Amino acid sequence: VGGYAFAYQGNLTFATIRGAGHEVPSYQPGRALAYIKYFLSGTSLPIFHVHV
């Protein structure tokens, strides 16, 4: 697992990158690039839906 993405009602997604500090590209450059590519292409991040 490279991190987690949570989709909230509306148009908000909160994403974390596992093992990264506040300067994600410095700590996890490959994972940061993947997230940036998703954002620039307009593709949604893979979301695991949990019903509570």
Image (cartoon, grey):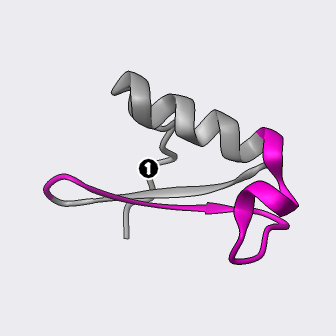
User: Does residue 29 show up magenta in the picture?
Assistant: yes
Nearest the viewer among 49 and 44 is 44
Q: Residue at x 65, y 34 (%)?
A: 34
- Tell me residue 4's x, y (percent): 61, 57
Q: Residue at x 77, y 76 (%)?
A: 21
- Tell me residue 1's x, y (percent): 79, 49
Q: Quadrant of residue 13?
A: bottom left
Q: Quadrant of residue 22?
A: bottom right
Q: Which residue is mark 1?
A: 49
In the displayed structure, 50 sits above or below 52; it is above
The magenta stretch spans which residues? 10-30
- Please, what is the three-letter code of the amino acid marked with disc 1? His
For numbered disc 1, what is the local secondary structure? loop
Q: Residue at x 18, y 60 (%)?
A: 9
**Is residue 34 toward the left or the right of residue 44 in the image?**
right
- Tell me residue 27's x, y (percent): 86, 62
User: Does residue 38 show up magenta in the picture?
Assistant: no
- Count of numbered circles on the image: 1
**Is residue 17 toward the left or the right of residue 35 in the image?**
right
**Is residue 51 toward the left or the right of residue 17 in the image?**
left
